[in-house]
């Protein structure tokens, strides 16, 4: 089975690298998302990385200066042609609960996200 078959469209996508992490955390809770892909703009939809709950718990107060660009994860990013077992191995290797799925590693156009729950 290929990753594109189980990838789902995220409810929330981060489109600004300079957003405070506290704002992103509030939106992630609102939409109940675990993997938040970070893209540069709406038209390109090019993935630059992603955030997980680990990065979102970093700010300890509302007066923190931590921004998305400071904590963004760049690896792993899955391609739509990856096998599900490859995705599982990448999650274990990079110690993450999920990753964004792109069309290919050159264009990095967002297809969706995959988490451990989606693999099950």
Image: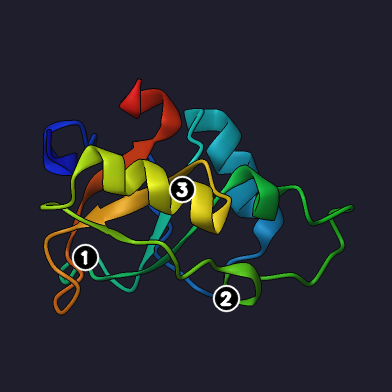
Please tell me whether mark 1 sits on a helix, a strand or a loop: loop
Residue 103 sits in which quadrant?
bottom left
Give the crowd class for mark 2: few <14, some 14-19, many >=20 residues within 10 Å: some
Query: What's the CA distance linking mark 3 and mark 1?
Result: 23 Å
Residue marked by disc 3: 91
Q: Is residue 55 above or below residue 39?
A: above
Among numbered discs 2 and 1, the one appearing first in the sequence: 1
Q: Which residue is mark 2?
A: 69
For marks 3 and 2, the one nearer the N-term is 2
Figure check: 15 above or below 13: below
Give how far apart the Cα atoms at labels 2 and 1 are.
17 Å
Instruction: Look at 40% across and 47% down and name the residue there.
Output: 89
Q: Identify which residue, 14 or 103, lies in the foreground.
A: 103
Q: Are marks 2 and 1 in contact (CB under 8 Å)?
A: no
**Which of the image's four quarters has the N terminus?**
top left
Q: Is residue 98 left or right of residue 66?
A: left
Residue 83 at x, y percent in the picture:
18, 45
User: Looking at the picture, how far across and down is residue 96, in whole percent?
Assistant: 54, 48
Q: Farthest residue toward the bottom?
A: 106
For the C terminus, the image quarter is top left
* Label 1, residues with CA under 10 Å away: few <14, some 14-19, many ≥20: some
Q: Is residue 109 left or right of residue 65?
A: left
Quarter of the image for residue 114 reads top left
| Mark in the foreground, 3 or 2 | 3
The answer to whether any part of residue 36 appears in the image is: no
State the image coordinates of residue 110 (x, y, percent, origin top left).
Answer: 21, 58
Tag 1 or tag 3, which sits nearer the N-term? Answer: 1
Determine crowd level at label 3: few under 14, some 14-19, many 20+ residues with C-alpha closer than 10 A.
many
89 or 118, which lies in front?
89
Using the image, tell me which numbered label, if any, was put on residue 89.
none
Frontmost residue, 110 versus 29? 110
The image's mark for residue 45 is 1
């Amino acid at each position: 089975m290929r990753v594109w078959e189980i990838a789902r469209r995220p409810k929330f996508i981060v489109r600004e690298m300079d957003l405070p992490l506290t704002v992103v955390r509030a939106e992630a809770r609102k939409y109940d998302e675990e993997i938040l892909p970070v893209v540069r703009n709406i038209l390109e939809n090019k993935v630059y990385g992603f955030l997980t709950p680990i990065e979102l718990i970093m700010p300890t107060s509302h007066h923190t200066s931590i921004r998305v660009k400071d904590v963004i994860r760049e690896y792993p990013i899955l391609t739509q042609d990856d096998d599900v077992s490859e995705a599982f191995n990448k999650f274990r290797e990079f110690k993450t609960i999920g990753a964004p799925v792109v069309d290919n590693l050159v264009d990095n156009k967002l297809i969706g996200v995959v988490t451990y729950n989606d693999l099950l």
